[in-house]
Image (tube, rainbow, N blue to C red):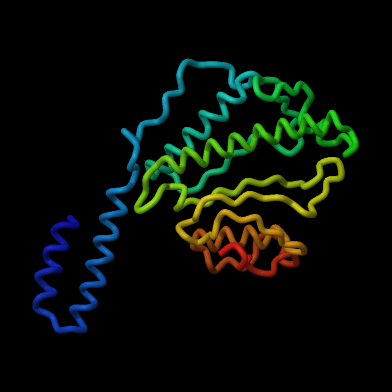
Amino acid sequence: ILDFVTGDLNALHNRLGAADGEQVSRHLSAVRDLESQLQNLGAGLDSCDAPDLGSSFDVNAVVNVPKVAKLQMDLLSAGMACDQIRVASLMFAGGTNNQTYNFDGVNVTEGHHTLSHRGNGDVAAQEKLVKINTWLADQVAYLLAKLDAVPEGDGTMLDNTLVFWGNPLSVGNAHSRRNLKYIVAGGAGGYLRTGRYIHLPGRAHNDLLVSICHAMGLTDVERFGAAEHCNGPLGELT
């Protein structure tokens, strides 16, 4: 259909004046851009079938947490590469979930929530929390690598995606929401300037969420959550 339309437009272009011809040229460029995008959907994948889940297993067993996490991220990245989904969320455990991480690579038998309420001076608890958070960071890195492995346009799917990794609290034992640390990865189609650590004292995370809306094209969004905590998007991200 695109080839047919392009041929007709080219024939029409030859019979038009300069001003009208320029308008048709812009439309032809838009058609070619659309064709390029369609050709790149799912590029880099042999097929758009769901990943092989393998034989059934107990998804609630602690030892299988890494396997479940990997399968979830494989499904997420495949869904995006095949243009079946555009937005997804992945939560490893709820805020009060006492998930244990007693598997290879972490080997922490105490619940995450319990550990997070130990005092800052509890060295053993802090070391275990570091192990848990390091494992979680490894999972985020795996997801980013999956997205970056899919060619898309002049770059990869990661270049056109925004990945937000966060935690609702900065210090678990105090339930503090100050000095929260967030990771924003991917290029969001060129919206973000990446490869930086930005310190923004006094700015609420609501403004970061507004910025994410703007990165996704929702530029009419002026607030996210309570209005008193919103001052507009973070210009430092672009």
Q: Residue at x 39, y 45 (%)?
A: 83
Asked if residue 89 lies left or right of residue 151, the reply is right
The image shows residue 157 at horizontal and vertical percentages of 43, 47
Q: Residue at x 21, y 72 (%)?
A: 25
Q: Residue at x 48, y 33 (%)?
A: 74
Residue 63, by quadrant, is top right
- The quarter of the rendered structure image containing the N terminus is bottom left
- Count of marks placed on residues: 0
Residue drawn at (13%, 68%), measured in percent from left and top? 10
Above-or-below relation of 197 to 73 = below
Q: Quadrant of residue 8?
A: bottom left
| Nearer to me, 187 or 11 | 187
Say which quarter of the image contains residue 57.
Answer: top right
Which quarter shows the C terminus? bottom right
In the picture shown, does residue 169 fall above or below 55?
below
In the image, residue 211 lies at what x, y percent? 59, 62
Residue 226 in percent (x, y) is at: 72, 62
Q: In the image, is 135 to the left or to the right of 31?
A: right
